[in-house]
Image (spheres, rainbow, N blue to C red):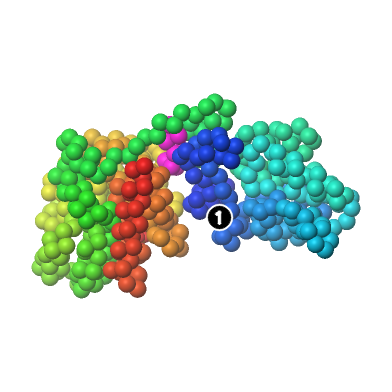
């Protein structure tokens, strides 16, 4: 079974917590917003959640289980199925016909009921719910909660004699997301301020627009070109052409060409590769549709070897690739020889269990920031402003591929990471109509970019 941390990160991907600036029901401005209802839409997550909750509890104490409506209803149901604790249902309002009962199901007076809640904030709504259950002669001793917003609710209920079990606290979750590079130190500071009861100052960091990036000093010529194409075509989409033949490569390039800023290749997977037949026509298609060529070679050697791999062998990458990807594991100097292309450094990977932890990313980012050949990075976290951020692991329809890939939506990465370019592979080339799919991703990417400008 995955660790609790891995489990939380899976839940997080469903969009259950959003960070930014939110006005709560009370009118208070909060730096985060929690909605756990999406958890119920993923059966595997819901089942795992039920088991994580049950693991925390002295189950012998309970005769019944009940969820506080509505968000906790599916959670309580799943916990009932996993534990065989009989479920009772609490209505929000009594029916105005028939029995007028507030509690539905089979129960007896004197039974002890475990109460399930999704989020605990002040605890006031739980304090209103409990008497409604106790009025039926049922006792409540324990409450189990998925997320504690740490705003006094747990303490209030404990002061009234209830035991409160919480799976996650907001502080724990923030620390985890900070470690994962999903939250900046500033955001964490704001959340801590908010939890301490201070009025939070929202000086939201604005992302730079493509035009502002073009206007900045010392911009690499390939970065400038890419940004200009983005503005011209209103696209930030890079299609990943992970296809196996020259014909498929050319066909895909023709179809998606009008909608993309770059075509990303893994040229070594083309089974019938022939420089003249594969590359020369591809250069023509790129010129015709005004996109750049990006070879995702992920160099990972010493400088001398990378220099040879870049310019020699059958692929002669330096002749045609406007952009290349490279690891920075060989150190600063290993990047010196990539003269003809803009280098995109691999800083963090999208696959499950990647070794690109925060420490690695920080060190790799320092190299990327200081090397003149580097224009940006491939990453799943926000990067310093001077680096363009390329984010793969984008899909509008699925969350994973069963082989370790982890997907996000364009909206998520533009809003939370300030991504500059999205990279989409199977979402486009495996689509029934790649041309149409590339248009959908282009529109989704551009809308998400504009929304991220605020
Ligand atoms: P897909 O959208 O089909 O999962 O493809 C993603 C593409 O991006 C692949 O070509 C993969 O090699 C690349 N990629 C990635 O998925 N994650 C990374 O961290 C770095 C990548 O280059």
In the depicted view, which residue is nearer to us: 381 or 199?
199
Q: Horizontal and vertical percent for residue 19?
A: 47, 41
Q: Say if 42 sits above or below 343 in the image.
A: below
**Quadrant location of the C terminus in the rendered image:** top left
User: Tag 1, which secondary structure?
Assistant: helix
State the count of labels: 1
Span highlighted in magenta in the image = 178-187
Q: Is residue 132 visible?
A: yes
**Residue 212 found in image quarter:** top left
Left or right of 143 in this view: 208 = left
Q: Say if 171 sits above or below 275 in the image.
A: above
- What residue is disc 1 on? 38
In the depicted view, which residue is nearer to us: 392 or 373?
392
Q: Say if 148 sits above or below 72 in the image.
A: above
In the depicted view, which residue is nearer to us: 102 or 9?
102
Q: Residue at x 85, y 48 (%)?
A: 135
Q: Is residue 335 visible?
A: no
Residue 185 highlighted magenta (yes or no): yes
Left or right of 353 in this view: 276 = left
Q: Say if 70 sits above or below 197 in the image.
A: below
Q: Residue at x 82, y 58 (%)?
A: 100
In the depicted view, which residue is nearer to us: 218 or 124?
124
Left or right of 182 in this view: 287 = left
**Residue 182 found in image quarter:** top left
């Amino acid at each position: 079974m995955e660790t609790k941390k891995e489990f939380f990160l899976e839940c997080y991907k469903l969009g259950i917590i959003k960070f930014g600036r939110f006005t709560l029901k009370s009118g208070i401005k909060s730096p985060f917003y929690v909605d756990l209802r999406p958890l119920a839409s993923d059966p595997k997550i819901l089942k795992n959640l039920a088991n994580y909750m049950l693991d925390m509890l002295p189950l012998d104490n309970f005769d019944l289980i009940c969820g506080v409506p509505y968000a906790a209803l599916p959670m309580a149901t799943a916990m009932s199925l996993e534990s065989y604790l009989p479920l009772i249902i609490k209505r929000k309002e009594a029916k105005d016909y028939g029995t007028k009962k507030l509690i539905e199901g089979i129960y007896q007076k004197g039974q002890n009921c475990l109460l399930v809640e999704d989020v605990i904030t002040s605890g006031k709504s739980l304090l209103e719910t409990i008497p409604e259950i106790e009025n039926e002669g049922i006792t409540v001793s324990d409450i189990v909660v998925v997320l504690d917003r740490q705003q006094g609710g747990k303490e209030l209920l404990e002061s009234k004699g209830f035991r409160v079990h919480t799976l996650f606290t907001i502080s724990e979750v923030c620390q985890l997301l900070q470690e994962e590079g999903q939250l900046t130190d500033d955001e964490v500071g704001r959340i801590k301020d908010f939890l301490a009861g201070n009025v939070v100052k929202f000086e939201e960091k604005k992302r730079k627009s493509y035009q502002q990036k073009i206007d900045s000093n010392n911009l690499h010529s390939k970065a400038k070109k890419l940004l200009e194409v983005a503005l011209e075509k209103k696209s930030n989409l890079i299609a990943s052409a992970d296809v196996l033949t020259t014909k498929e490569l050319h066909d895909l390039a023709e179809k998606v060409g009008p909608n993309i800023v770059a075509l990303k290749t893994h040229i070594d997977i083309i089974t019938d590769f022939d420089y003249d037949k594969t590359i020369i026509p591809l250069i023509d298609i790129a010129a015709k549709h005004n996109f750049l060529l990006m070879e995702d070679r992920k160099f990972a050697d010493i400088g001398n070897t990378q220099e040879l791999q870049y310019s020699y062998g059958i692929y002669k990458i330096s002749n045609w690739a406007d952009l290349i990807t490279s690891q920075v594991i060989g150190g600063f100097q290993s990047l010196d020889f990539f003269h003809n292309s803009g280098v995109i450094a691999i800083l963090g990977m999208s696959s499950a269990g990647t070794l690109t932890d925060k420490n690695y990313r920080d060190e790799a980012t320092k190299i990327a920031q200081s090397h003149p050949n580097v224009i940006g990075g491939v990453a799943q976290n926000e990067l310093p402003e001077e680096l363009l951020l390329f984010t793969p692991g984008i899909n509008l329809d699925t969350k994973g591929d069963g082989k370790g890939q982890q997907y996000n939506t364009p909206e998520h990465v533009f809003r939370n990471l300030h991504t500059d370019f999205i990279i989409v592979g199977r979402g486009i080339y495996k689509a029934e109509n790649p041309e149409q799919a590339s248009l959908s991703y282009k529109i989704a990417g551009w809308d998400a970019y504009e929304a991220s400008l605020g």
